[in-house]
Amino acid sequence: MTRTARPPACSAAGGCTKGAIMTQWHDRAWGMWRYLVLRGRFFIQASDAVVARHWQWFLFAGLLTPGLPVVSLFMVPAALFAQDLSAAHAFGWHFGVTLLFEAGALAWVLPQRRFLRGGAFRDYIRTLPISGIARCTVSSVLLCVVDILLFMPAVIGTGMTGHATIFDLACDIEKTLAFVAIILMVQLGIVERLPFLLLAGLPADIVFAAAASIADSTAAMLVLSGAVACALPCAVLAMRAERFRACRAGKVGRPVGRLRPKVRLPAVWRVQFGILARNPVISAGCAVLSVAVPVGAGALIRAFDYDGRAPVAIVVGMAIVAFVLANLYRLLADAHAMARPLFMTLPLSRNFWPIRDCCLVVGLGMVPLIVFGGILLAHRLVSQWAFMGLAAGYVVLLALLRVVVGTDTRFRFMLAAAFSIAWAGAAIAGVSG
């Protein structure tokens, strides 16, 4: 009797165990779904101004792209991606194009990273028993939704590539999926602040470029699997670093972002530079672009052999630098608005911070102006009086862009672009005349 009674008991116990496992998996899936819904709902409600600004960027880029207004905006990068999939170019070309696409993807997601992370809701999430894998999974799903417009040229470019056999088509599909995975990995490293994922982007790009430059589909697929091998160890290290950072989150450390007591700066400068230091990505991006644009303009006019197109390129570069530095006004104005109740108790005029913010941005804009002026005067492209007028107009444009901050957030980009384009047109007419 005992031998015949044990199997039903074991099966019953096994059934209970399976039922408990299924219930646990169901609860985890339901919790993951609710977490995804909450994150998605917060992103939709909190990022309306950012999404509107992105669509304005999209419309502006569509107007500047030669060809049909909207179709060419997808077909031009699609044709470039189709060439990236083919083995007609060398390794360096594929690597440069891959970095170009990654830079565009990062520029697309950087203004949205605060909302993708959850904003102030993120501090509440840290108190919940949600693993790093769950957070990264939900963030990856949100990134896939945000990057729909970016992935459309990749899909179109895959279809534009000629395929002799089905195996070649499968190889190109695998390259496209690997490319999308690399883009999502780098974006996830930015959103979730996982430096190991960002470090994994460079070897993954090298492996992808090497696979794209191989004509043999079989060898390309074998080499392409190395991109996954580069990403997995860095993902494991990123999860461990996340756990270590979460363990240290409760410990009290030194205050971050304060200047050393030995550095004696004016109080106004300490406030302004402290605001810029709390937004390192935007501040560093503006600084890099304000230096890269003059250097690129110098290389461009060198290709023009310093002919009549050189002053036009310099004027356009100055307008781009002014448009980029205008983003610092937004950071400073938002921080001042948060501290407005404190400033109202102090004997400060209403225009105290706007005037000093203008002085700061104009002072930062002097560095690219020196580079532009050195190019114009060294090669005698314009006279000294013309350059003085151009410099004065550049300073006026930087100060005028401060007015855009007081407008609605949905129209700041278009107004700043309109001011910059109008100034560039007037300056080109004056220089050409």
Image (cartoon, rainbow, N blue to C red):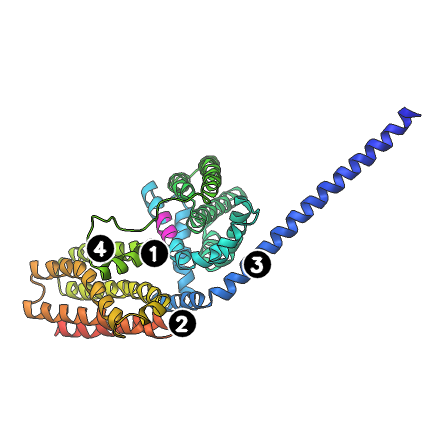
> Looking at the figure, which quarter contains the N terminus?
top right
Give neighbour class at mark 1: few <14, some 14-19, many 20+ (Cα, 10 Å). few
Rendered image quadrant of residue 335: bottom left
Distance (Cα) linking label 1 and label 3 = 26 Å
Give the mark, 4 or 3, whose residue is nearer the N terminus.
3
Q: Amino acid at mark 2?
A: Arg
Circle 2 Cα neighbour tier, 10 Å, few/some/many (<14 / 14–19 / ≥20): some
The kind of residue tagged 3 is Leu
Q: Nearer the viewer, mark 2 or mark 4?
A: 2
Mark 4–mark 1 distance (CA, rounded to whole Å): 19 Å
Name the disc covering residue 410, or none.
2
| Label 1 residue SS | loop
Marks 4 & 3, CB-CB < 8 Å contact:
no
Left or right of 47 on screen, residue 297? left
Q: Which residue is mark 1?
A: 279
* Residue 396 in view in this figure: yes
Name the residue type under label 4: Val
Is 100 included in the stretch rendered in magenta?
yes
Q: Nearer the viewer, mark 4 or mark 1?
A: 1
Q: Residue type at mark 1: give it.
A: Asn
- Of labels 3 and 2, earlier in sequence is 3
- Which residue is under mark 4? 291
User: What are the residue bounds of the magenta stretch?
Assistant: 98-103
Q: Nearer the viewer, mark 2 or mark 1?
A: 1
* Disc 2 to disc 1, C-alpha distance: 21 Å
> Label 4, label 3: how many angstroms apart (C-alpha)?
41 Å
* Circles 3 and 2: CB atoms closer than 8 Å: no
Mark 3 residue crowding within 10 angstroms, few (<14) / some (14–19) / many (20+)? some
- The residue tagged 3 is 38
| Mark 2 vs mark 4, CA separation in Å | 28 Å
